[in-house]
Amino acid sequence: MSGAIDEAVTFEDEDGEANELPTEFATATMGHVLLGQGRHDAAREVFRAALAKDPGDLEAARGLRMMGEPVAEGRVAVTVLAHAVDPTTVYARWSDGGVGQALVVVSLWVDGGRLRRDEREEALAPGAGEAFVRGLRPGASHHLAVGRRTEEGFTPTVTMGPVLTPGAAPSERVATELLPVGRRPDATLFEEALDAWQRTVMPSS
């Protein structure tokens, strides 16, 4: 029996007696306590009531999923963030209701005119929502996905990227053209354009 948002949550205890839990106490924490006590029906009702109050309650959604209950798409707020920390490291943060079990990273880069690809997978701790992904290839585009690994394959629940990591060293153009700007004896294109503009608007007397 599901409790409405403004009504008490009613369920049967282990002795078969009816119990009522005021809606304000129908929280994901209470649901997990009941689940830990083996009172699955009660926990299910509390998780449902918590989600009815707050459709973005990730812990309540996770509790239902742990019990094999489907959670309607869109009821759980999903947030993602991924950015490069250095040439070989990407920081990722996500929320998917705690269902992610694996992190898959696909890296793409150009080498000698050919597109290269590398893929790696890392197991996630239960409920993990962030990770530093280290040992990546510098100067590559990295696509990240969090999801479940089953016998049928990998099913993503959250995707992130592409994240571009900088090269481990400056490119030839940066090293030879951009870094020395302002220190070269010859004028840069910008300086030449600035000089031409100044001569136009402020002609010398």
Image (tube, rainbow, N blue to C red):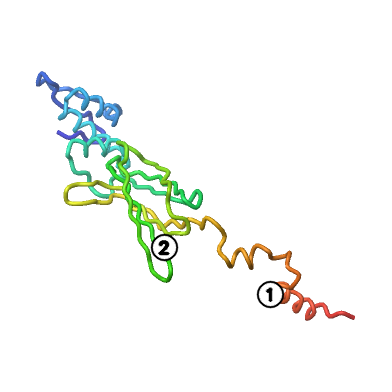
Q: Residue at x 51, y 57 (%)?
A: 166
Assign the C terminus to one quadrant of the image: bottom right
Identify the image quadrant of the N terminus.
Answer: top left
Q: Which amino acid lies under the numbered mark 2 shown in the image of this protein?
A: Trp
Which residue is farthest right? 205
Dot 1: within a 10 Å radius of its alpha carbon, few (fewer than 14), some, or many (20 or more) residues?
Answer: few
Residue that badge 2 annotates: 109
Instruction: Return the residue nearer the eye: 128 or 86.
Output: 86
- Judge by depth and name the residue closer to the eye, 3 or 121: 121
Which of the 4 quarters of the picture holds residue 24?
top left
Image height check: is 159 above or below 66? below
Q: Residue at 47% across / 56% down in the picture?
A: 138
Element type at mark 1: helix
Q: Residue pushed farthest front?
A: 112
Q: Are marks 2 and 1 in contact (CB under 8 Å)?
A: no
Q: Is residue 15 above or below residue 31?
A: above
Residue 186 in the image: above or below residue 105: below
Residue placed farthest to the left in the image? 16
Spatial CA distance of label 2 from label 1 is 31 Å
Mark 1 lies on residue: 189
**Seen in the image, is 178 located left or right of residue 50?**
right
Q: Nearer the viewer, residue 74 or 142?
A: 142
Marked residue nearer the N-terminal end (2 or 1) = 2
Residue type marked 1: Leu
Horizontal and vertical percent for residue 86? 51, 50
Q: Answer with the quarter of the image where residue 186 lies.
A: bottom right
